[in-house]
Amino acid sequence: MIIKLSRKTFWRAISEAERQIERGNLIVYPTDTLYGLGAKATSDKAVRRVYEVKGREEKKPISVMVSDIDMLERYAYLSKHEKEVASSIFPGPYTLLLKPKRLSRYLSKTGRVGFRIPDNRFCIELSRRAGPITSTSANLSGRKAYSIRGIMKQLGDKISLYIDSGILGKKRSTLIDPLQY
């Protein structure tokens, strides 16, 4: 299913995306950088499916999107310094490395996970309703795609819902290690 994102379809897209995530399915959604491949980040089964669909090596981590600092605190251990860093960069095109809690064990083999709070209303509302969601680029591992059409050519019917917001920028989020910030 494809939903073209607009003011008229915004809440329908949020509801359908939430429904698909709750069922354990994968979605493609727009962020403030690229399209993300979304699944329930607390589900081992859903996260393993993300690796499978992307053809991604399991040693490579997958980032997680949350809606705000309060949700970040529920799913990551934050020192005072890490909370200050998070508060200074979010929302925005950044990925902050933190020690996770209550998330799928398959997200990372290093003990830290990249967390995002994109500067994107759709992302914030979806995560607020569906909880933490995987936030890895929507493409086959090692390939690029910036439009729903290009992503569909790579991922096809393995995705239950595509949220089309046109061609997105060709930039990735900046990775920040708070231990070095």
Image (cartoon, helix red, strand yellow):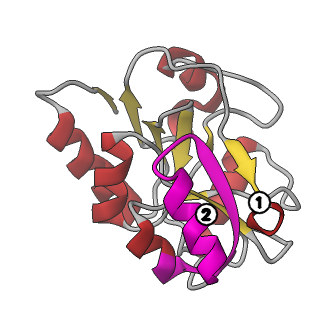
Eyeballing the image, is 2 above or below 119? above
Residue 181's tag is: 1
Q: Residue at x 49, y 79 (%)?
A: 73
Q: Tell me if 144 is positioned left or right of 91 in this view.
A: right
Q: Residue at x 70, y 57 (%)?
A: 62
**Amino acid type, mark 1:** Tyr
Q: Is residue 13 visible?
A: yes
For the residues bearing labels 1 and 2, Cβ distance under 8 angstroms = yes
Percent from the top left, x then y, of residue 171? Answer: 66, 26
Percent from the top left, x then y, of residue 7? Answer: 15, 27
Disc 1 element: loop
Q: Residue at x 49, y 53 (%)?
A: 90
Q: Which one is nearer the viewer's eye here, 69 or 130?
A: 69
Q: Tell me if 123 is positioned left or right of 151 in this view.
A: left
Q: Quadrant of residue 43?
A: bottom right
Q: Which residues are magenta?
A: 73-100
- As for residue 140 lying within the magenta part, the answer is no
Q: Earlier in the sequence, mark 1 or mark 2?
A: 2
Residue 116's tag is: none
**Amino acid type, mark 2:** Val
Percent from the top left, x then y, of residue 34? Answer: 56, 30
Percent from the top left, x then y, of residue 146? Answer: 58, 19
Number of numbered discs: 2
The residue at which mark 2 appears reads as 85
Q: Quadrant of residue 111?
A: bottom right
